[in-house]
């Protein structure tokens, strides 16, 4: 059986999908006084200002060299899968927000082109409702009925 068939994908094969979209900084350091333990940090770099911080959160793994040999690749695989899922979901959310903002701008633009959004008509209605109707001069006064009675002689 060829050696290639039994080998599991390595560290860089697991990082490749992440590397397609951004640079990644990898640091390895020995932890002093920790009995030969190492710390590996895999730090995705920021692509642009204002980018979601979650997309640049580093993966930090600590263990002995043997533990890292056995487990680091699976840790990186999970990290890259989560990262790509977040990136994909974030892109979808950003697209939906941009679409909603565009629709809101278009709606506001429509209101402006109809004629200042009906503000004048609304203001006129409010003004009319606030003003009492003028006194109707044709209405009878208290003395109108008495004039008719006064002009007829009393019997």
Image (cartoon, grey):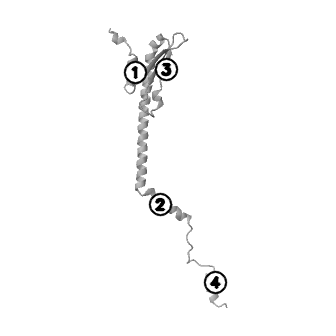
Mark 1 residue element:
helix
Q: Which residue is at a point 61% across and 79% down the rendered structure image?
A: 141
* Label disc, if present, on residue 15 of the rendered structure: 1
Name the element at disc 3: strand
Q: Residue furthest left?
A: 2
Which circle, 2 or 4, is nearer the viewer? 2
Q: Which of the two labelled residues, at mark 2 and mark 3, occupies the earlier sequence position? A: 3
Above or below for 153 versus 84: below
Please state the horizontal and vertical placement of residue 110, each as a whole percent of the image. 40, 52
Spatial distance from mark 2 to mark 3, Cα to Cα? Answer: 62 Å
Q: Which residue is tagged 4?
A: 146
Tag shown at residue 60: 3
Q: Residue at x 37, y 22 (%)?
A: 16
Which of pointers 2 and 4 lies earlier in the amino acid sequence?
2
Residue named by callout 2:
120
Instruction: Tell me which numbered mark, 4 or 1, is placed earlier along the sequence.
Output: 1
Mark 4 in CB contact with mark 1 (< 8 angstroms) = no
Lower position in the chain sequence, tag 3 or tag 4 = 3
Q: Nearer the viewer, residue 116 or 133?
A: 116
Looking at the rendered structure, the number of numbered marks drawn on it comes to 4
Mark 1 crowd level (few <14, some 14–19, many ≥20, 10 Å Cα): some
């Amino acid at each position: 059986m060829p050696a290639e068939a039994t080998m599991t994908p390595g560290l860089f094969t697991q990082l490749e999908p992440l590397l397609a979209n951004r640079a990644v900084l990898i640091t390895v350091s020995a932890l002093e006084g920790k009995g030969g333990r190492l710390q590996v940090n895999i730090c995705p770099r920021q692509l642009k200002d204002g980018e979601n911080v979650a997309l640049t959160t580093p993966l930090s793994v600590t263990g002995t060299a043997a533990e890292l040999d056995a487990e680091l690749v699976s840790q990186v695989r999970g990290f890259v899968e989560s990262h790509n899922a977040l990136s994909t979901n974030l892109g979808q959310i950003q697209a939906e927000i941009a679409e909603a903002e565009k629709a809101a701008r278009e709606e506001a633009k429509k209101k402006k082109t109809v004629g200042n959004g009906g503000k004048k008509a609304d203001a006129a209605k409010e003004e009319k409702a606030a003003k009492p109707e003028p006194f109707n001069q044709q209405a009878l006064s208290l003395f109108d009925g008495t004039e008719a009675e006064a002009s007829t002689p009393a019997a």
